[in-house]
Structure formats: structure tokens, C-alpha cells
């Protein structure tokens, strides 16, 4: 096998085009080239006058090649089958990415697996969310945060990861077999989109059921069953008592009542920093023009990432979870509280693009109290709800008004389904107002047009990550509760779909090593 890197002005979307290019570049007949595989594909828009596509291609050839080529070998994921799990019973709390992929590995390894999910299966969950959008009546157990697939089901479905794991091959293979587009293997910033992700989740569920996994929906975890030595013997839900050998805690970062229940049972946890702020929304064509210099139908909707670090106080304001051509959604899980998030469909064809603009917050702000960060989230979300008129309308201002601290009483239309209401949202974040203002001014230097009358800031974004970590040791087990294995985003050990899925796969290994 050989590997070659190259830039090309055109988006080579077919293997035939790539074969023709390699043939011309290497001066060999195209019939000699076979087994073409795209390893990486990204858009280089640093020079707006010379935007190019970057490719890394792996292929085999029927003759020995010379020149600037690399010989390469195919990397594969380690075997998922583990010994020692046969007849072991494992209960998984939560059916997000970490819970789903942990269940797949357990089932493939012969373990008996039960999943407890407080929300609905994805088809019914979609109906619950649509009903909320129509009636403003929130189902507190089945919504954008809770339900099969986790919070990521209603998102852009990003598959980027800052960490490398041999399990990424397996994760991407499973997602593709379940309906994700093949391109997620090689795009530099892959995404599935909320529409395709819902299909993927349903197909992953069917795989789990075919492997013998039991899934209980609309069933809330209430407490662990512990012996006198703090060894887990099972758990109690809102509907039944379950005995088991191990419990995998794969809750989402919005399961506040679960954190509290575990804490009252003595499970060790610690405060964790998170980020909070706003959603920024601007026309997608404006983003494209800023990023590309011109709008081209041959280029995908543009993204952006902006960051300003305040070294003197050790905090940063940055953009996060950018949704090109997406919408802003009410990601609420409790009545009387308003929290926002972003969501995109696969084709990202919406009129607006949006992203979180958040400030990093440290536990020292809430004196390292275990639930201090959670209480801060609640305070912000409740104030936001009141500021919007107590009906899930989002309080908002233009970025220009935010910087100048004034209010325009006429705001342009937003993608947010409940509409926006002019409000001085800096008051909700008064302790960090100046950091946001300075960051917006800095962002505007990097992307001219960020401060404008057609760019909105909507309050508030608070669920960037968990404010609590359920501490585990090197063995993957809770440091004071035996046979309890915290994992995934809600436990504080991952961020996003891919890292959460990988953590779910790895935690099963920890169970085997510590049995």
C-alpha cells in the first residue's frame, strides 16, 4: 500500500476522479491503481484567493512505485471480544453514546446487559420534543436532554475528538453500518446531523436487542443497592429492583437528581469546572463570506472557532459547538428554566449559523462546593427564563448592543422556535460582562462583522459539560464504591459523541481487569 498527500482546487467527490488524478500525477496507467481509500479530506481556506482541498489517499498499485510516496500499513482496532464476562450481569444507567457502546461490547463478550433509560425511545422522544415546540409544555423526562441517544441526538452530530483512540475505527464502522454517511471516516470535521443521527440511534438499538440486551425506557434510576462494605449489589429504579454484578454509570450531564441521589448514598464526587454564556447567531452566508472571501456553491457551509484568553485572571472566552446552517433550540430539562443549544441537519442548509460563546469557569468561583457549579447553572437558567417572559422565549440583544450596553427594541427574526425578546442579557452574567465585551471586540478583529446589528446573542448556554466529576481510579471504578464504574460525559470523563463512545468501550475492559 502507498500513501500520498496533495492539494486540489476541485472537490474530488468520486473515486474515479481520484484515480484519474493519481494516474496523471504518477504517470502510470489508471488500470494499475486499485484499492483507493481516502484517509483524510479537509478544506484549506487560509488563503482566500487560493482555497484548496487537501487529500491523503491510500492505494495499492500493481507495480513498484518510486518518488515522494509513503509505504503504509492498514491500522485496525483491537478486538472487542473480552474473556471473563460470560454470565456476568451488568446494569447500565443511561443510553447515550457511552452507554450504547459499552452495551455493544458487553453483549459481544457474552455478558448479560440491561440498560436503564429515564427518557423515551427516539421515535417517541422526537414527538415529545415537537410537542414542546408547539405547546411550550415540557416533558421533564423525555426532551432534548433526556432519552435514547443522549443529548447529542438533538445536535449537529459532530464526531470530532481531541484524543486519539484505537477504538475510533470500530466506532465509525458501527455508526456507518447504522446509517451514518461513509465520509465520516475521512473528513477532518465530520458530522452526522440530527436527522441522520436519529436513524443511527434506532439501528444501534436494534443491534443491541438482537444481541440480547434488555432496554427499559421511561424508567428512572433512584438508588444503588450496597452492602456494608460499599459493594454494589444492584440498583432500584422507579419501577423495579435489579440485582447485578456491576453498574456502569453512563448518565448525561443534565441528570442533576441522579448526582444528588448518588451523593446522598456517599458516592465520592468532586466539583468540576465548566463553561457558560450565550449562543451567537448570524446569517450563514455572512459566515461564508467572512471565511471564504466569497460564497461558492462548491464549498460547504463555513465554520469558525474563536478564542480570547485573559492571562491575568486565567480565564478564556471562546466559541464552541458551532452549527453551520443550523438552528438554536431550547434544551430544557426542568420547567421554569431556560437553556439553549445548537442543532443542525446533515445538509446544514439553514439560513443561519450559530455557536456558543462561553467563558471558562473554575470551581474556586463557588468555593469548591460539590454542587456549587450546578447551583450556578440553575441560577443562570432560571434568571434567563424570567428574562424571556417565563414562556421559553429567549432574551437577546445584538452584539453591537451588548458591547455598547444598550437595547434595541426591534430585533431581527431568529431560528429559535419560541422567538426572542430584547433584554440586557449582560445582567445575567454581570460578574463576567467585561470579559465577554472584550472578547467580542477581539473576535471582530479576527472575523470582521461579528459586531453588527444582524448578529444576535441569545441567553443562555450553560450545559457545555458536567459541573461535577464522579471520581474513579485507574481501575475505572468509583474510588469509594466497589463495582460502580462511572463513564462518559455525565461522569466527567469525556466530551462529545466519539470520546464518550470510546470511554464506554474502555470501561468494559476495566470491569474485566477488576473482576
Image (tube, rainbow, N blue to C red):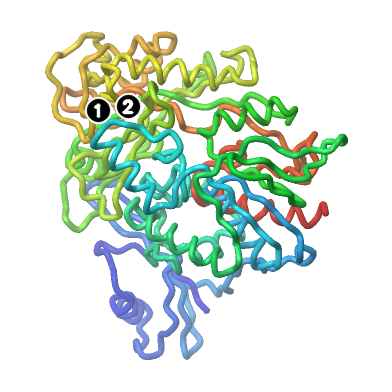
Mark 1 = which residue? 450
Identify which residue, 340 or 281, lies in the foreground.
340
Q: Position of residue 433 (x, y in %)?
A: 38, 12
| Residue at disc 2, secondary structure | helix
Quarter-of-image position of residue 401:
top left
Residue 333 to residue 288: above or below: above
Residue drawn at (33%, 42%) of the image: 343
Q: Is residue 90 left or right of residue 4?
A: right
Residue 166 to residue 465: above or below: below
Identify which residue, 282 or 151, lies in the foreground.
151
* Mark sitting on residue 443: 2
Residue drawn at (37%, 37%) of the image: 305
Q: Position of residue 445 (x, y in %)?
A: 29, 26
Give me the C-alpha separation between circle 1 and circle 2.
Answer: 7 Å
**Pointer 1 and pointer 2: residues touching (CB < 8 Å)?**
yes
Q: Crowding at label 2, few (<14), some or many (≥20) Cα neighbours within 10 Å?
A: many
Amino acid at each position: 500500500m502507498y500513501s500520498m498527500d496533495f492539494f486540489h482546487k476541485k472537490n474530488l467527490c468520486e473515486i474515479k476522479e481520484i484515480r484519474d488524478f493519481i494516474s496523471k500525477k504518477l504517470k502510470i496507467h489508471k488500470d494499475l491503481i486499485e484499492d483507493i481509500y481516502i484517509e483524510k479530506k479537509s478544506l484549506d481556506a487560509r488563503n482566500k484567493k487560493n482555497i484548496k482541498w487537501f487529500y491523503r489517499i491510500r492505494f495499492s498499485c500493481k507495480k513498484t512505485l518510486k518518488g515522494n510516496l509513503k509505504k503504509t500499513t492498514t491500522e485496525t482496532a483491537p478486538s472487542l471480544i473480552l474473556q471473563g464476562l460470560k454470565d456476568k450481569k451488568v446494569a447500565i444507567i443511561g443510553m447515550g453514546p457511552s452507554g450504547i457502546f459499552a452495551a455493544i461490547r458487553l453483549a459481544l463478550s457474552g455478558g448479560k446487559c440491561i440498560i436503564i433509560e429515564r427518557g423515551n425511545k427516539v421515535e417517541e422522544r422526537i414527538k415529545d420534543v415537537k410537542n414542546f415546540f408547539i405547546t411550550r409544555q415540557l416533558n421533564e423526562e423525555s426532551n432534548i436532554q433526556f432519552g435514547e441517544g443522549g443529548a447529542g441526538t438533538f445536535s449537529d452530530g459532530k464526531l470530532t475528538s481531541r484524543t486519539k483512540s484505537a477504538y475510533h475505527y470500530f466506532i465509525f464502522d458501527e455508526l456507518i453500518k447504522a446509517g451514518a454517511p461513509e465520509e465520516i471516516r475521512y473528513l477532518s470535521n465530520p458530522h452526522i446531523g440530527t436527522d441522520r443521527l436519529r436513524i443511527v440511534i434506532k439501528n444501534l438499538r436494534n443491534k443491541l436487542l438482537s444481541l440480547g440486551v434488555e432496554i427499559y425506557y421511561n424508567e428512572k434510576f433512584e438508588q444503588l443497592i450496597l452492602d456494608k462494605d460499599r459493594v454494589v449489589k444492584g440498583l432500584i429504579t422507579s419501577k423495579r429492583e435489579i440485582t447485578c454484578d456491576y453498574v456502569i454509570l453512563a448518565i448525561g450531564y443534565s441528570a442533576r437528581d441522579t448526582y444528588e441521589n448518588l451523593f446522598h448514598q456517599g458516592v465520592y464526587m468532586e466539583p468540576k469546572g465548566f463553561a457558560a454564556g450565550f449562543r451567537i447567531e448570524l446569517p450563514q452566508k455572512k459566515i461564508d463570506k467572512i471565511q471564504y472571501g466569497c460564497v461558492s456553491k462548491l464549498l460547504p457551509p463555513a465554520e469558525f472557532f474563536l478564542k480570547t484568553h485573559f492571562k491575568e485572571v486565567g480565564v478564556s472566552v471562546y466559541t464552541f459547538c458551532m452549527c453551520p446552517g443550523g438552528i438554536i433550540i431550547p434544551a430544557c430539562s426542568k420547567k421554569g428554566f431556560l437553556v439553549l443549544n445548537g442543532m443542525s441537519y446533515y445538509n446544514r442548509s439553514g439560513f443561519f449559523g450559530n455557536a456558543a460563546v462561553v467563558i471558562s469557569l473554575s470551581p474556586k468561583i463557588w468555593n469548591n462546593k460539590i454542587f456549587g457549579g450546578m447551583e450556578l447553572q440553575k441560577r443562570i437558567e432560571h434568571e434567563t427564563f424570567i428574562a424571556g417572559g417565563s414562556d421559553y422565549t429567549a432574551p437577546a440583544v445584538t452584539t453591537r448592543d451588548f458591547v455598547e450596553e444598550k437595547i434595541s427594541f426591534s430585533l431581527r427574526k431568529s431560528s429559535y422556535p419560541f422567538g426572542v425578546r430584547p433584554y440586557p442579557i449582560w445582567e445575567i452574567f454581570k460578574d463576567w460582562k467585561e470579559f465577554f465585551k472584550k472578547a467580542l471586540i477581539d473576535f471582530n478583529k479576527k472575523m470582521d462583522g461579528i459586531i453588527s446589528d444582524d448578529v444576535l446573542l441569545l441567553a443562555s448556554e450553560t450545559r457545555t459539560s458536567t459541573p461535577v466529576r464522579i471520581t474513579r481510579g485507574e481501575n475505572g471504578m468509583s474510588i469509594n464504591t466497589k463495582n460502580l464504574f462511572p463513564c462518559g460525559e455525565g461522569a466527567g470523563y469525556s466530551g462529545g459523541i466519539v470520546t464518550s463512545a470510546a470511554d464506554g468501550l474502555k470501561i468494559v475492559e476495566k470491569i474485566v481487569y477488576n473482576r
